[in-house]
Amino acid sequence: MASHSRCFPFEKSIVLGGLYDTIEKLGLSLDSANSARGTLIVSNAEHTGRMRIAIGFDTGGSQTKLEVYPEGGNAGFAETWGPVIIDELAGSIMKVYPTERDGM
């Protein structure tokens, strides 16, 4: 089960690009990525915690869903960083792609 999740009213490629920028901006380390599947493994600079971030479509298919999962048994890392990443990503995307849709 995902620790944190959020739907964005944008294409998967926009959310994925914004996520790469957000990870770098927050000083986190991108350990591995599969852009085709929309999965990333992210850790802190010291590599003491890891999380998996999955990007896909919501059940309706009109939005992109981002989900943060613990990776490697350290749920605290995903619990701490999941909301930070989601909030920072939402703010960054909204600056570039403002929208009138509610739900953001």
Image (cartoon, rainbow, N blue to C red):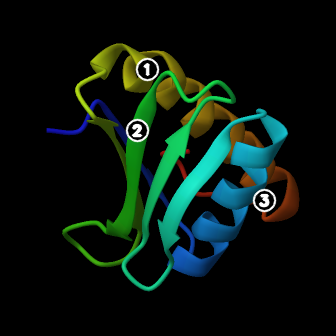
Q: Residue furthest left?
A: 1
Spot occupied by residue 86 in the image (x, y as percentages of width and height): 56, 38
Identify the residue position indicated by label 1 in the image. Answer: 77
| Residue at which label 2 appears | 51
Q: What kind of residue is marked 2?
A: Met
Q: Which SS class for mark 2?
A: strand
For the point 69% across and 45% down, which residue is it? Answer: 23
Q: In what quadrant of the picture does the C terminus appear? A: top right
Local SS, label 1: helix
Name the residue that disc number 3 marks.
98
Residue type beneath disc 1: Phe
Q: What is the three-letter code of the residue carrying label 3? A: Pro
Q: Earlier in the sequence, mark 3 or mark 1?
A: 1
Question: Toward the viewer: 16 or 57?
Answer: 16
Q: Residues within 10 Å of mark 3 (few under 14, many from 20)?
A: few
Q: Where in the figure is residue 100, as x and y percent of width and height?
A: 67, 57
